[in-house]
Image (cartoon, helix red, strand yellow):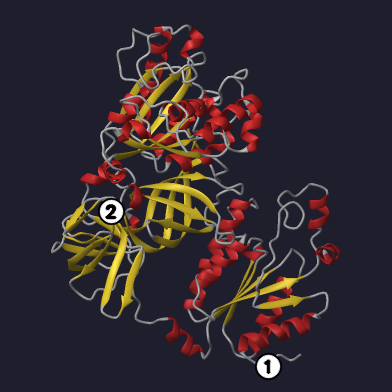
Amino acid sequence: MTSRTAVKSGDSGLEGQLGATTSISEYLALHESKSLLRFITCGSVDDGKSTLIGRLLHDSKLLLDDQLATLESDSRRFGTQNGEIDFALLVDGLAAEREQGITIDVAYRFFGTEQRKFIVADCPGHEQYTRNMATGASTADLAIVLVDARKGLLTQTRRHSYIVSLLGIRHVILAVNKMDLIDYDQATFERIAEDYQQLAERLGIENVHSVPLSALKGDNVMSASTQMPWYQGDSLLGLLETIDVSRAESKQPFRLPVQWVNRPNQNFRGFSGQVASGEVRVGDEVIVLPSGTRTRLASVINPQGESSSAREGEAVTVTLADEVDVSRGDVIAATSHPPEVADQFASHVLWMADTPLLPGRGYWMKIGSQTVAAQITEIKHRVDINSQKLLAAKRVNLNEVAYCNLMLDQPIAFEPYADNRTLGGFILIDRQSNATVGCGTIDFALRRATNIHWHQLEIGRQTRAAIKGQNPSCLWFTGLSGSGKSTIANLVDRRLHTMGYHTYILDGDNVRHGLNKDLGFTDEDRVENIRRVAEVAKLMVDAGLIVLVSFISPFRDERRMARELFDDGEFLEVFVDTPLELCEQRDPKGLYRRARAGEIPNFTGISSPYQPPEHADIHLQTADLTTEQSVELVTSRLLGQTDPS
């Protein structure tokens, strides 16, 4: 297929670019050597983002016959330009987008000119799709922020500009669109440009270029407009072709996150990945982190074969001079300036899930090629993205940004996001659904991560357990209020005591009189309640005790977090499974009656959910078991005796 629009000499279409070459292979070689610019368009609803991208694609003369025919047909069916070509339809691909005339999902498009290749992401303007916009911005080098010349800077303009700043985009083109609707007024453009410059300075955006244009009419998009002779700057395309967006990574020391240990046979062991920053040569000394092992680079292999060096952005396999233990997620770095290693950080987090972020809840964190267990230990404050005000918060909801302390289960090599996107940016993953629930940027390591070390004790758990003649363990009783958890736990404790075992009970009500008396019953406080108790239970097991924990503990995530504190075989989850109707009939404290009357908020089973265990170690269906039978099942399993049934 060929382009319907005729291509003249000097045009940026395929035929125009082939004019100076003699073969397809030469053209492809020329194309590969061009620099690539990734950019996004963002701004408020109906500012003309999709129209602008459509205009760029159309006027670059890279549309094929069938695409043009489809565009003309869709413009008549869905267009908003009275039957004329609606360029926005080139990008708005979802049915809902065309019906509503808005952008919902991020749309990626590729185009090129003689000077440069481009990948553009059209990001949605609605507030509820902020997470989609952040996805598009995460890989961009430049942002085009569109502003309707009739409206000036709006709330969503400020919101998107904040996210642009948060995700490290330091080059912005302010496109003041729809100038044709204000008769190309210079004073209006200059006022909007000055307002945005002040906003950019507050947000730390270093480079801003302002362009007055009309995406619909094409003014100042591909070339200078005769309608605005007072504007002496470059057109939008001119800026895109010439702007220097080289990032700090190219000037940083060498960093190679290992994605794959390449072992095709017993004679070769290489380490594959994409160079995140810097350059390295064969023979250079390198360090493997977090282990800290030093060695030298023996060889570099890229898709073309062996090479003497590797630089930022290249996908390579390297071999090392010595036999060194290197795994996926490790970082091979320059010894002269190695990255830091830590397990606690201060970071900004943008939340992308419907369920809120709660401190103390466990997530997977993926950073570079490494995946580790993580939890938010503290929310320092929430950021009002619209006004950039700092607000107190105990949770983070969908599309909100917060400044948090983050703790990992193991040290990792990292760099601040401002210095290195690959080693400073991360995503958070739900441990049940494996869905991406948040993204974030690391600012710095907390001092406690390097100043506090685990002190090795001479007398350990096994020694303390041996003197007691028992295997230390944790029995975690979970179930609804009134299910019989405390009753069964107390009777198990009594039986173990008569048999000579050393035990202790941590009961939910008792602990709230002391250790957790500052906590309420919101989801956030429930998470912290379980976190504290799990840590106390861990200490008791370290002391050689058999500890019985009797807590409602309604959330699976927190019960999983508690289990992961213990070694294999030390933690037994006991699900005291009693139907809600039976719990309400018992109701020894009258709590269900009050909860049904609305007198007790956040009551588990009534106004707050209970997530039953999916794979409990011991399942007590108390409607079919006597209390004594339940006690016998628990003690038999704990002591490894034969099940009496």
Location of the C terminus (image quadrant): bottom right
Which is more toward the observer, 327 or 308?
308
Is residue 387 in view from this perspective? no
How crowded pointer 2 is (Cα within 10 Å; few <14, some 14-19, many 20+) is rated as some
- Between 6 and 92, the one nearer to me in the picture: 6
The image's mark for residue 272 is none
Instruction: In the displayed orientation, state which residue is furthest to the front.
Output: 22
Is 593 on the left-hand or right-hand side of 174?
Answer: right
Q: Position of residue 131 (x, y in %)?
A: 52, 41
**Closer to the camera in the image, 540 or 6:** 6
Q: Quadrant of residue 464?
A: bottom left
Q: For the view shown, which residue lies furthest in the left direction?
A: 283
The quadrant in which residue 507 appears is bottom right
Q: Position of residue 260 (x, y in %)?
A: 35, 66
Residue 257 at x, y percent in the picture: 32, 59
Q: Is residue 90 above or below residue 307?
A: above
Residue positioned 56% across, 26% down in the render: 45
For disc 1, the marked residue is 642
The amino acid sitting under disc 2 is: Glu
Q: Which residue is mark 2?
A: 314
Name which residue type carries label 1. Answer: Thr
Position of residue 633 in the picture relative to residue 318 (left or right): right
Dot 2 or dot 1: first in sequence order is: 2
- Per the image, label 2 sits on a secondary structure element best described as loop
